[in-house]
Image (cartoon, grey):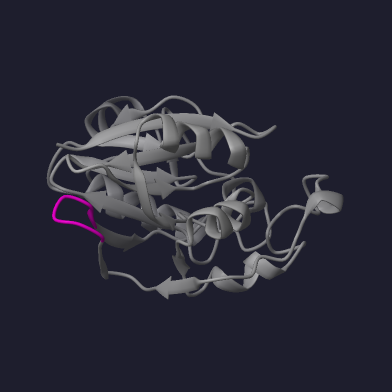
Amino acid sequence: MIQIQTIPVGELEANCHIVSDGKGNAVLVDPGADASELAYTLTSLRLKPLAMLLTHSHFDHFGAAAALMQQFSIPLYVHVLDEPALHSVRASGAQSCGFGDQFQDLAGDIRTFTDGETLTFSDELTFTVMHTPGHSPGGSCFLLGDDKLFSGDTLFRNAVGRIDLPGGNIRDMRESLRKLGALPSNRTVYCGHYENTTLEHERMFSPYLTKR
């Protein structure tokens, strides 16, 4: 049975989602900061981390990745179009947000994915990639089962991600939101910031997301 712990991390309170299965395996979505807190959570819950997934490569979503990669010997997955930003103070948004002095080039076992790929880590931890650019060129959502969606900074509760950071594009964002609105079923949406939501709530109340 899938369990999900959502932990806001860092000064910008990006959500890191720790997704675990019934056998104690875990995948971290967006390990943005506070590596020691995330490691403590994994250890206290007796979880075995297998990998980390990035919805996009802005600095506040991967700041803990280097330390966790080293501590647990696990890979980091990112869309091929966003991989270069892991090595750029500008493209990662750190410079424009005033965190340039804290930026560190990310190295280690970095693996890339593209739209439509399936990332399988266990029988239950099987994620499907949905490329949703707009907030960043390689921004992606992850579908898990029939009822879970990890949206990163593409979709929030009653809001959407910024398009004024490096790599943002309003036309891409509109198309990505159209794709999310057209998904065939309701899903719990685990967002990159703030509280989580559901697709049905956003289709009913958000001006940004419709079924059209």
Q: Is residue 137 left or right of residue 116?
A: right
Residue 132, magenta (yes or no): no
Identified at 25% across, 42% down, the residue is 24
Identified at 27% across, 70% down, the residue is 117
Identified at 34% across, 40% down, the residue is 47
Span colored in magenta = 121-126
User: How many labels, in total?
Assistant: 0
Identified at 22% across, 31% down, the residue is 200
**Residue 138 percent coordinates (x, y):** 49, 66
Is residue 165 visible in the rendered image? The answer is yes
**Residue 83 percent coordinates (x, y):** 56, 71
In the image, residue 14 sits, relative to residue 29, either above or below, namely above
Pick the front one: 137 or 207 = 137
Magenta span: predominant SS is loop
Residue 125, magenta (yes or no): yes
Is residue 156 visible in the rendered image? The answer is no
In the image, residue 96 sits, relative to residue 198, either above or below, namely below
Pick the front one: 95 or 72 = 72
Pick the front one: 23 or 27 = 23
Q: Report the residue that reaches farthest toward the right.
A: 101
